Image (tube, rainbow, N blue to C red):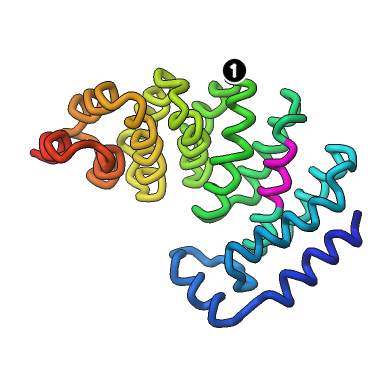
Amino acid sequence: MNEILDKVRRELMEASDEKTRETGLRFFKEVVSLYGIRAKTVTEIARSNYALIKHSPKQEILNQCDSLWQSGMMEETFVACMWSEKLAGQFVPEDFKVLERWVHMYVNNWASCDTLCNHTVGDFIGKYPGFISELKRWARSENRWVKRASAVSLIIPARRGKFLAEIFAIAEILLLDTDDMVQKGYGWMLKEASKPWQKEVFDFVIRNKAVMPRTALRYAIEKMPPDLRSQAMKK
């Protein structure tokens, strides 16, 4: 399997571009490590190489994902996220420890957080909803990315009309957080929940708007009709 990782890294390096790297860095306030590759190209590299390992044992693929995470290179973390998403149907409850370790040890920016949690972690939670209790624990972390992960892991389930009570519970925990990355994360979760549950999310926002950070509030109401947005924004 090591030769596959070498191949992935060689292809990423060959596809890198300094101008793309410099442009990418502008999207982050924190220090990140980039090759400088367009997202479409990273996806193509991930897909073509996964085809070479897709029949390997799940644990071997997870080990390769772990090696990609350890590199600290963002495009490698994206490959790891795409590969782990392919394994979602094979996950068993014990695999949560692997996903949690990645979130706690390696996620250090919004892009890696969202790419991992929207899909791989979200798919896991969809399969094993009992682990939402662990997301609530994440929401109480001191790590900004772990807190954001607790919310963005429910983006896809929210869009599908699942787990409204749990979504509100996590939003309550994060409600007064002063970190804009956390505010945007739970605001985004509420925005997705507003698609199937507009009234319920609107009522939640109105009930909490006196203390809810404006960043989170704006995200939460973004897809609502103008009259509802206007009501929510009134002080």
- Give the magenta range: 80-87
Q: Is residue 198 depicted above or below 35 in this figure?
A: above
Residue at the spot of label 1? 130
Residue at the spot 65% in from the left edge and 47% down from the top edge: 105
Residue 235 shows in the view: no
Q: Nearer the viewer, residue 184 or 139?
A: 184
Q: Is residue 111 depicted above or below 18 in this figure?
A: above
Where in the figure is residue 213, as x and y percent of width and height?
25, 42
Q: How crowded is mark 1: few (under 14 residues within 10 Å), some or many (20 or more)?
A: few
Where in the figure is residue 42, as x and y percent of width and height?
66, 62
Q: In this view, does 111 lie to the left or right of 234?
A: right
Q: In this view, does 20 lie to the left or right of 68?
A: left
Quadrant in which the C terminus is drawn? top left
**Which amino acid type is marked by label 1?**
Gly
Magenta: main secondary structure:
helix
Q: Is residue 12 depicted above or below 58 in this figure?
A: below
